Image (tube, grey):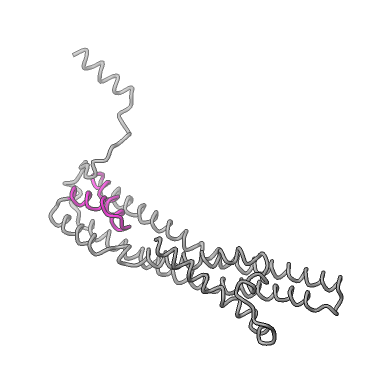
Amino acid sequence: MKKAAKFAAFAALMLLPMIAFGADGAEQSVAVKKTFIQVLKEGGWCMYPIGAFSIGTVWLIIDLWIRTNAKNMTPQADVVTAKQAFMAGDYVTAYQAMKAAISPFAKVIQSGLNSVGHGKDATEEALQAEVDKISSTLQTRVNYLSVIGVCSPMVGLLGTVSGMRGAFAALGTSGIGDTSKLAGHIGEVLIATASGLFIAIPAFMGFYFLRNKLQTAIHNLEIEALALFRNAPYDYLRDADVGQEETFAAMPLWLQTEQASAQESI
């Protein structure tokens, strides 16, 4: 993930010059060429949150692309290990192997095995609950792209309003004769507007693409998990503690007291 974060920052920095070029290209053709930093400064204060949005957009797209890949959601190594253990009837080994793995598939199978002793309905509920948990976690990350797509143009629009306010203030104090101040504020308006749109467009594209990719990955995860438990011998697994995890729900204290009294009387 550290490599993905570094690549996201690099890609975002590569994206910002495109934003600045698109907004300031016409001006540069007739004026002295400006450095990248100078063009960003012309965008005003709004370039700071927009720059953060650009880094966040690239990082989220890369991160979610990696997380929703089939080899990360349902690794073949984990699937094969689980199938071999299930076919051998060694559910304890299957549980321990899935507990040691880190993939979403392994977590789903681990949850199902932990409830397999309580019957088919409890097992399927545990499987579905874990799938929903994984889906909710990843969907929250995907939704951040939508938030960026909505907020970036709004921040750009706020920068536009700020630049227009400065332009009219310069026009009121210096008059139409001093065009340098007026041009500076107009440049801020153009850069702010273009920057917000340049970030919003890829953010929305990434949102819709990754949302569909996530739905496909979750669907495949459900199919693989349910296939393992389709013909599970629940009658023979009744009350089996496959997970051997510590439980905290003990017998009610008053029943323990009654049993202890009964044993003492005997």
Q: Which residues are magenta?
A: 91-118
Q: Is residue 176 above or below residue 119?
A: below
264 and 161: which one is in front? 161
165 and 207: which one is in front? 165
* Relative to 69, 25 lies left or right: right
User: Could you say which quadrant of the image residue 214 lies in?
Assistant: bottom left
| Figure quadrant of the N terminus | bottom left
Please identify the residue farthest to the left as the structure is shown: 88
Q: Main secondary structure of the magenta part?
A: helix
* Relative to 71, 165 lies left or right: right
Q: Is residue 128 above or below residue 65?
A: above
Residue 111, position in %: x, y? Answer: 30, 50
User: Could you say which quadrant of the image residue 133 lies in?
Assistant: bottom left
Magenta stretch containing residue 94, yes or no?
A: yes
Residue 158, position in %: x, y? Answer: 69, 66
156 and 248: which one is in front? 156
* Relative to 169, 259 lies left or right: left
Residue 188, position in %: x, y? Answer: 70, 72
Magenta stretch containing residue 165, yes or no?
A: no
Q: Residue at x 28, y 55 (%)?
A: 106
Residue 221, position in %: x, y? Answer: 31, 62
| Figure quadrant of the C terminus | top left
Q: Residue at x 53, y 74 (%)?
A: 15
46 and 151: which one is in front? 46
Q: Residue at x 27, y 51 (%)?
A: 110
